[in-house]
């Protein structure tokens, strides 16, 4: 059997990296084939896992990444055989489902989107809101009043996204807005 190419080693969320053009940054998330990296002076960028220009800062040695590789491989094998649920964030009852957008105008074609794709986009919005929240809270020149005002906007954004909580497997991962 021919060798299958292995996926490039993924760095964990939180790893500090340096990019030749964007400078220092921190990995804040993963897309299917890219890192989501927040750079100090260039904002959020998406960098392919296969890109070899990233330099890891600090003491992130290969030995520290090895447990993550083993866990990922084990999760992949067990998921292929149906022994574990590999997409733990989305509720299993939605797996394989479709979101149908049916227009109100007659003669206009409806749009179908796989729920897994839609859910990943919702999760992407959540991750970007979290990054925004961290940047606002750590911004050196915003007053406490401004931070509080922006925090209110973010909370209302989360509240608007509570409609999609039905898709989550775990209530702890759901969106929460303002209460009361």
Image: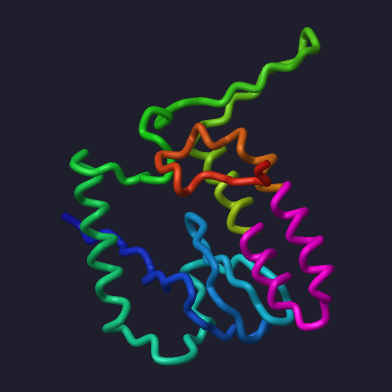
Q: Position of residue 87 (x, y in %)?
A: 37, 44
Return the residue found at the far bottom: 58
Depicted 30 relative to depicted 134: above or below? above
Return the residue found at the far top: 106
Q: Residue at x 77, y 53 (%)?
A: 153
Which image quarter holds the C terminus?
top right
Q: Position of residue 45 (x, y in %)?
A: 65, 68
| Magenta span includes 168 | no
Residue 70 appears left or right of 39: left
Residue sitting nearer the eye, 162 or 97 = 162
Q: Position of residue 100 (x, y in %)?
A: 60, 21
Which image quarter holds the N terminus?
bottom left
Q: Residue at x 53, y 45 (%)?
A: 120
Depicted 28 relative to depicted 59: above or below? above
Which portion, as a residue range, is magenta? 129-156
Depicted 96 relative to depicted 105: above or below? below
Q: Position of residue 36 (x, y in %)?
A: 57, 66
Q: Quadrant of residue 70?
A: bottom left
Return the residue found at the far left: 1
Residue 83 appears left or right of 174: left
User: Magenta part mainly helix, strand or loop?
Assistant: helix
Q: Quadrant of residue 40?
A: bottom right
């Amino acid at each position: 059997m021919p060798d299958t190419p292995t996926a490039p080693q993924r760095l964990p969320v939180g790893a500090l990296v340096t990019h030749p053009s964007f400078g220092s940054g921190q990995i804040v998330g993963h897309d299917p084939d890219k890192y989501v990296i927040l750079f100090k002076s260039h904002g959020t960028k998406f960098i392919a896992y296969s890109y070899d220009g990233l330099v890891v800062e600090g003491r992130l040695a290969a030995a520290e990444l090895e447990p993550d590789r083993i866990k990922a491989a084990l999760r992949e094998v067990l998921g292929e055989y149906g022994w574990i649920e590999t997409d733990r964030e989305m509720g299993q009852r939605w797996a394989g489902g479709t979101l149908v957008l049916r227009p109100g105008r007659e003669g206009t074609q409806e749009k179908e989107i796989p729920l897994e794709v839609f859910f990943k986009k919702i999760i992407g919005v959540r991750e970007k809101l979290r990054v925004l929240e961290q940047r606002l809270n750590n911004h050196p020149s915003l007053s406490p009043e401004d931070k509080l005002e922006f925090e209110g906007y973010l909370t209302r954004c989360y509240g608007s996204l509570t409609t999609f909580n039905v898709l989550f497997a775990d209530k702890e991962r759901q969106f929460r807005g303002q209460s009361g």
